[in-house]
Amino acid sequence: MLRFLSRRLLQGVFVIFGLSIFIFVISRIIPGDPAKMALGPRATETAVEQLREEMHLNDSIPEQYYYWITGALKGDLGKSVNTKRAVVEDVSEFLPATIELVIVSGIILIVVSLLLGVLAARYKDTWIDALIRFTAYIGIAIPSFVMAIIFLLIFGLVLQWVPVLGRLSPGMTPPPTVTGLMMVDSLIAGDMAAFWDAFEHIILPAISLALGGLLQEARILRSAISDNMGKEYIAVARGYGIPNNKIMNKYLLKPSMIPVVSVMGLDLASLMGNAFLVEKIFNWPGLSRYGLNAMLTKDLNAISAVILIIGLMFLVINIVVDIIIAALDPRIRLGD
Amino acid sequence: MTNELLSIKDLEVWYKTYRGYAKVVNGVNLTVNKGEKVGVVGESGCGKTTTMKSILRMNVQSAYVNSGEILYSGENILKMNEAKLQEIRRRDIAMISQEPSAALNPVFTIGEQIRDVIRYSDTKKKFTKEEMQSKAIDAIKSVMISDPERILASYPYQLSGGMKQRICIAMGLVVPRNVLIADEPGTALDVTIQDQIHRLLHNLVEEKDMSLIMITHSLGVARELVDRIHVMYAGDVVEVAKTDDLFKKPLHPYTIGLLDCVPKLSGGGISEGIYGYVPSYINPAPGCRFASRCPKATQICREQKPSMTSVDAEHSVACFNYQ
Amino acid sequence: MSKTVLQVNHLKTYFTVDKRKNLFVRAVDDVSFSIDQGEIVALVGESGSGKSTIAYTIMGMYETSGGEIIFDGEDIANKKRTFDFKKKAQIVFQDPGSSLNSHQDVKEILSLPLKVHKVVKPSQLETKIIETLDRVGLSEDFMYKSPTAIGGGEKQLVSIARALCSNPEFIILDEPTSNLDVSIQAKIINMLLKLHEEQSLSYLFITHDLSLVRNISTKVIIMYLGKICEIANTEEFYGNPHHPYTQMLLSAIPVVSEEEEQLKPSRIRSTGEIPSPVNIPKGCSFNTRCHRAVPLCFEEDPEMIEVTKGHFVRCHLYGKCKPEL
Amino acid sequence: GGSSSNTSQNSDASASNNASSDAGNTGAAAAKIIRRSVSGTPKVDPAVGSDGGSTLAMVNLYDSLVYPVADGTVEPSLAESWEVSDDNLTYTFKVREGVKFHNGDTMTANDVAFSMNRLLKIGEGPAYLFEGYVESAEAADDSTVVFHMVQPFGPFIETLTKLYIVNEAQIMDNLVADGPYGEFGDYAKEYMLTHDAGTGAYMLVDIQQQGYVLADRFEDYWRGWDNTDAPDQIKFIDNVEASSVRTMIGNRELEITDEWQSTENINAMNKIEGVEVAVMSTGMTQNMMYNTKLAPTDDANFRKALNCLFDYQMISDKILIDSPVSVGPVSANTPGASTDLMQYTYDIEKAKDYLSKSKYANNLADYPVELFVNSDVADHEKIALAFQAAAQQAGITVDITKGPWLAIQERVATVESTPNMLCISVAPHYMEAGSMLATRYHSNSVGTWEQAEWLQSDEIDGLIEDALATTDRAARFEQYDVIQKKLVDIAPTAWLVDLSERHIYQSAYVYWPVAESAKEGTIITLPLGYTEDYRLFKVFPDQIPQ
Amino acid sequence: MENQGRIHKNTFMKESTRENMRMYWYKFSRNKLSVLGLLLVISSIVIAIFAPVIAPFPQHVEAFVDYNNASLAPSSTYWFGTDIFGRDILSRIIFAFRGALYMSIIVLAIAVPVGTLLGLIAGYFGGWFEVVIMRLTDIFLSIPAIILALSIASVLEPNLTSSMIAVTVMWWPWYTRMVAGMAKSYSKEYFIKNAELIGASKFHILFREILPNCISPILTKMALDVGWVMLIGATLSYCGLGEQPPTPAFGQMISDGSKYMPDLWWMTIYPAMAIAYIILGFNLLGDGISDMFNKGRQ
Ligand SMILES: Nc1ncnc2c1ncn2[C@@H]1O[C@H](COP(=O)(O)OP(=O)(O)OP(=O)(O)O)[C@@H](O)[C@H]1O
Ligand SMILES: Nc1ncnc2c1ncn2[C@@H]1O[C@H](COP(=O)(O)OP(=O)(O)OP(=O)(O)O)[C@@H](O)[C@H]1O
Ligand SMILES: [Mg+2]
Ligand SMILES: [Mg+2]
């Protein structure tokens, strides 16, 4: 297990290194003069030159990469020309909101998908199964940004069930920042009103973010369960009189989880990517919106940082998923 | 006939397939008496496993019992309610699976799986962990695996095919039963170990007054172990006889052909094999299913299904040549 | 005396299990035997005893860890197999399902060796395929069937047909019938014997069925845990088995008649454990199960001894500890 | 629309009850707050920010020496009076006394001089307005500040509406020593990201990047608070996403929308009870710029032909509603605009006529015209599509490219990459025709989105420079007129409409002076930002509709 | 004799093919949803091909505006209403099928062969090939698809070609990964061993032995991916990276329309339904294909 982990981490380092080169090159070959872009067309020549110098834009790409990577290793990802602050500062401001969103929708994704998948498998070929499968197909076929728009309008505007924009109602005083996660912070501060308000704000974006993956997962789980239902070991367990619900919850669920978890890893990780659109629509002050803005304004350091961080999180999630799979599947855990 | 413990009557099991129903088990009759060792032989795919799985109602979903009944102590298992069935599964009848590598759940340890079998064998009694562990260890030891603790803590993939097969057998033995169905328990083992296992089963029957149904495709194995043999061909039981009778005086042309194909230790070459191949189960021709391969087939064989006729007190055969 | 097709001398094939702990599986350990032209040599042993490994090493699929493989007078151990070798030596695997590509039809499968070895002109490909199918007793209807559409026995026949395509001198048959029914087995074995008679092919026939061996082979090799225990001509072997393991095997064979029962040595019940191939005990590897083991068996690994001409045994009872008769 | 309910105070009691019981849902709307959507988080450093949102923040957080009046002139603000030397090279301002900064410091002439110097040194924001004109600024005494000019600059006083006065002491206290500005370190640029240093009616409370800018009423504001209904708090919310804005307006979480909302969205929001459209002008014009150096739009006749393919009236009626058809390069309500210029109308025959005179008459097919539109502005796409259809009838192929704002900036950087046509609106930087003419057609603005024409005419450059150096207003306006006539002749641009800004606002409980006068028929033109000086607004939280 | 042989061959080919087809069709059609998926896909293709014939107002997808009929709700003239330019939404949706299919086909036509080839090489040869190729795919897979596509598309011109390039660049690693895994496991199978022992060339082994076995999962994945590519394409065009006006594209129609929700709901809902229709079709079809090739006892 330790060897497995360390190998996985080593691979991660390698991938991150490759990724850093890749994103660096990508962000540097974007045409246009980022310094000019940053200061606007009316800035004076000296101001522009000053910024170019500061951003090392006059050096060659490998040199620029050297500056960037050595900085990055020291935790300095450069300055955003957009917000005019250190990118690290921006990121530390926006990342918690994204993480909170991704965590909540990750939880929704996991819990609801398992629930639906098990439900559909258990009531296979009944109307419950049909309903879940039908919803799943439709849900998968509708792009998540469309879903977000529809949710926003239906629940936010027409029904007015929940507030829809930002992380907290305008009048609420945010709890003191400890973790940066609004819901956790408000619990730490013991501010239940803020907690519920934050919850109401996060629920729609989180659901629209989770929905696609969730339904996909439910479907995979259902078919994994029904595939395994025909396995000899289930027949054997039934033959020994193991109660039905035990078979369902233990003998079937665990092996069926393996394919789900591996896809779920990808889905959880892609939450990061899809958050780009959902945050935009729900005015969620997260990293993805920051990244999108950076891309539209060629904020080089910001782009690199965002991709790097998302890549990192992606890897971290994948490693976590690998660990979970290893926990489920002894072959991976104990095998070479 | 008073000690008849389990009997299968005119069982028909069909599989649903893309070409239609595969009428795999075609009216099988089989009885097991108390304390008896019964063999079921027949070549691969003739429906042995399907028939036996029907007893505990553990066939896959696509299999469906078209007709027939399975009586255990006079009660029809096929019509039994769930609770009663579970009772029988837990205490009375156990089946040792033919596919050891598929029969063990890959994500739980051997111990976990055996303990569950023990735990649910008696729902009224609460077994302690130690009790279960010691029962499990005994069972593992009985199938001649050393280091049972380590085996209990390992996962199926860590064991060889032969080990898994023995684990499956141990699982069937861990709780005493009235009927044990062993589905080709020796195939993954070499002859010397196979021999050990057969001895173990034999002893169990002798000591515990258990009944055994031994499924095999090897006539040799059946001859060594069981009292009475049912020969199956393509979903039908074609011949039933006391073991000695069968080998001395095989009646059904299929039985004769099969015996002929078995390589003999005495040498003398190998016969040409039975002409032709097993017919399709989908839309089988009416009549005897062996007719197309039978050297003695007549018109009637192709038109009607022969019924079981007693030739002797304990020897019956389903063939028009004997009617 | 006919020419020797294959001569294996002190062949070793080890697999590394753990480099750091220096753990090996001695899958094949110091094995020597030879096959003459027109011989059918049976290689018998329980599962995991290294039968397939010998076969694969001969075919060049594994590196050898020592010893010689002399084919057609040339040592080919650890050399890239030549085209000529690939033409002359063929193998038929145990699993008929996996040895045919299910996405090709029989014609395509059989074309490969014919094309690669330029056995016939392209225009005669079809005729040759039909001819080859005929040799294994399949009709030309099979040409356009896919392996998924034919039964296991027929698949194995197609595998054999493929092996025959390049007109080989020597075929290894790795348990070709052990997944099949006796009635199908009978057909295949008969066909193999017919081919053997017609063309004086040499077979290395791997199996664990001693009853079968009795009926087909000219020579028998018994293996246990990577080592050969006994080699003898068939008649000699069944008439006078020497090694305790051989005796145990023969005694355990289930047979179908009283007559055969007489031929078996008296029942020797197997006891003890089969040791793990990674951790073979000191001395004779069979010592954990041997009912006739003497103290020396736990100390020293016996040598191969030629008891009578052509009958070799690896047992102290026939060498160092020969009991006084 | 919600025209029935207005700001009159006689709303019934139940409405106010509902409003208060609804407070949980509408957030703090029960307080006197104005929330306004903006595109991009406003920058609150006057030496850095210059976009719309920043200007809006600046107007409310800071004061300048002068304050613009709707007729294009200015009135005293932090300056009580001023004098100009005879050579027009020295301006002396008398600075108001007793004005307090947000931190309690008193403003002096030193702060004014410091503000100008800091702006020039940093070189960002509105610095370009003064660069090349202002040589230095110094305080003669505590209440007198002197600006020395490099050359005469006619509209200097008007441009001073963009010089926001910052607190010198506060800036100097918060310098980061290690910076590009020598002894001034970073000139407190870092600090000014999150703090204001002004005297304005509102003082910054909180700023969240890509979130909002929040400011509270400054109690010690020097103009005092006669307007007791003025908002206590203002908030700029960085989000112009149509559905979000729409939702916020519906939930009364937003009082005023940004100016970027499409006609359809405005119409849709207008159906919400208690909201209305506010129309105003910042002197902005909607242009279709031609790249005069790129075939085929390098041919004047070809451009004129294209000019005849715009259905100006339809654009004004159907697409850019409330925006009258342009009269020429400068919007009609900008002081100095010529209104008697030759006008193009939608006339395909005439277009064909011009086309036949152009050098591309015989090989139109080889010269497709690329029209670039901002993908964020649906109305521009409408214009482009209508034009494309008309051009097809005249035998011209138009390829429309849609791209984000950034792509526009990239494309206009060089003459080769600038598309044939670019649909862009431009606002004057100060309220005079000269501002528009200089930014649009002087050679030093090529390579920016404000001039995609690449006109680079020495003659025009000279005329513009001369005009701007003319200090006499009337004489200057004469010269503007000459330039405008010349431009019409060259036809570097299709001037489509004088663009009005349209905002949706909560008319039921917000009183907005500029919007009120628009309702009465007068569209007020003020420099960017000044239409929303929130100290002049009134908020009646008890009239928030259900 | 020769003649007879040929007849033989033909009849047998036909018979086995027919038999296979029957089995595939049975497995495929067992799930009625798969048949529905097939119908949806076929109808989408038909719609795309015959768009000019089917669309009630084909001129509305070209340079055309009609502001007098702008933003009309669905009616008997305009079944799906008109957009803010006065163009018939139905006609534009019908034509949008073309672009969506076109994009998916081009992307997959490039990504699948490239990914498959690399996968075959990595899986069969192993060693350094495997290390290099698989790590490369890891790098590409460690960036969320949308972000990778956005960053690539923002480097290039924001048009259909560059968004196709972007999507292609992010798509091949999935095939490499899948095929490498299969190739690796097949290379241990006896039929590959047999081919090697007979002396078949590497080319033969890669393309005649391994590849045919990978075809069915590749096909299954492709059918599902057609939908996903469309989704990504729609997402990119939602972000403004896609077809240029006036050519209709689903993502752009939805993104434009969403600004006018809920009043001009028809501008968003119908295109969204259309894309859901086609994606649903391909998803169901993909499931069907996977059922079809699913081994298991018949
Ligand atoms: N799930 C299934 N669907 C369709 N047909 C099946 C299924 N399971 C088994 N069959 C068919 O039913 C027949 C009998 O199968 P069964 O496993 O009972 O035979 P068996 O006698 O146990 O054979 P073996 O000796 O190989 O174990 C075979 O022809 C098999 O192909
Ligand atoms: N590639 C390999 N790596 C490591 N160990 C191997 C490998 N191949 C075989 N072995 C080991 O070598 C020993 C001999 O295996 P081999 O397959 O030759 O046995 P066998 O006699 O053919 O058995 P069977 O009858 O099951 O085919 C076994 O212990 C096996 O685990
Ligand atoms: Mg069976
Ligand atoms: Mg083997």
Image (tube, coloured by chain):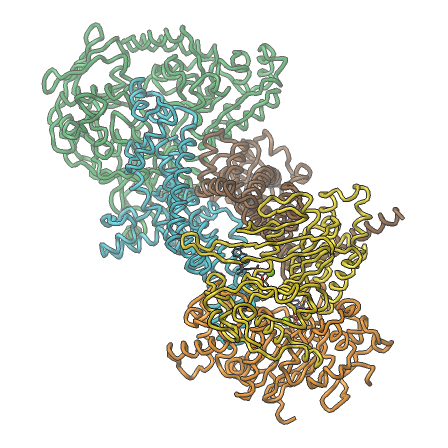
Chain colours: A cyan, B orange, C yellow, D green, E brown
Farthest residue to the right: give it. E1
Q: Nearer the viewer, residue D34 or D16?
A: D34
Q: Nearer the viewer, residue A51 or D55?
A: A51
Farthest residue to the left: give it. D141
Image quadrant containing the C terminus of chain B: bottom right
Horizontal placement of A237 versus C203: left or right? left
From this viewpoint, is residue E254 visible? no
Horizontal placement of C273 versus D106: left or right? right
Q: Is residue A317 above or below residue B304?
A: above
Q: Is residue B294 above or below residue C301?
A: below
Q: Residue at x 13, y 27 (%)?
A: D169
Tell me residue D450's x, y (percent): 40, 20
Q: Quadrant of residue D517?
A: top left
Q: Is residue C248 above or below residue E80?
A: below
Q: Residue at x 26, y 52 (%)?
A: A185
Ligand 2: quadrant of the figure: bottom right
